[in-house]
Amino acid sequence: DAKKYLEQSLRIQEKHYGTESIETATTLVNLGVVMQQLGNLKEAKEYLERALKIQEAYYKEEHPEMAITLGSLGSVFIDFGKLDEAKKYLEQSLRIQEMYYEPGHIATATTLVNLGNIFFQLDKFDIAKQYFQRALKIQETYHGQEYFATATTMVNVGNAFRELGELGRAKEYYKQALKIQETYYGKNHIEGAHVLRSLGKIHLLTGQTKAGEDLILMSSRIFQQNRQSRN
């Protein structure tokens, strides 16, 4: 598996280049990402911090490779629930990305989304909305308006508008996201079910009880179908 091969690669690199060489930093970052995916957050953090220390010593100043490591550390701290730490790393990553890449570079979109998620969790919905909208604009320019990766960001924008009480705007974004998801995944995918449920709640909040209940029922059936298919 990926973890095994990366650990083997790291041992070879450390033997030939030393434990503080720049060659090992990329492998450490990749190991950190894999460990995060496996839920081993403590190990992920340790690998990424080692990589960042090597990069800082080697490059002497901020460098695009460091932006990747900082962004990954920010993501790990989000998973830890340490939002202030995550925010610090992600803001540093974004600053480097904006320094080295042209405006609207796709690499910044993930960082913007992660920052939006942090501010959303901190109940700063207007700031979250701004980060999500910036990310969405980049994704739509890069991928086009009907690309599946933009759908998640559309849902995030919708969620922010919902929390700000702008239910009509939230509904627009949910409907856009649902259309894309159904095009890519079909009408019975769990991603679409989440959006259907959100749309149903918007209808309920705006007094459209029958439509809201129907949408929530549709989402429940998809969730049930997905549970049954896994068993």
Image: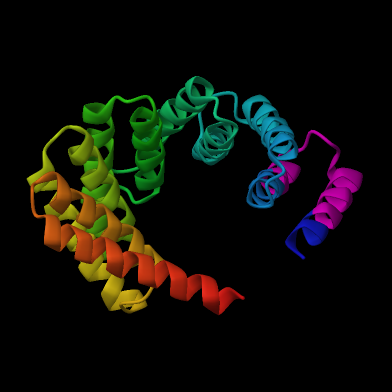
Left or right? Give the position of 66 relative to 179.
Answer: right
Left or right? Give the position of 174 relative to 226.
Answer: left
Q: Residue at x 17, y 32 (%)?
A: 164
Give how far across and how far down residue 98 sits, in percent.
Answer: 34, 35
In the rendered image, the vertical position of residue 190 relative to residue 107, given as above or below: below
Give how far across and how far down residue 2 sits, in percent.
Answer: 74, 62
Q: Residue at x 28, y 36 (%)?
A: 131
For residue 103, say whether it is visible.
Answer: no
Q: In which quarter of the image is the N terminus?
A: bottom right
* Secondary structure mostly seen in the magenta stretch: helix
Q: Give the range drawn in magenta.
A: 7-28
Task: Work out whether residue 5 or residue 194 is closer to the camera in this orientation and state it.
Answer: 194
Q: Which residue is drawn at 24% across and 38% down?
A: 160
Left or right? Give the position of 164 relative to 106.
Answer: left
What is the basis of the colouring in this image? Answer: rainbow
Question: Magenta span has 23?
Answer: yes
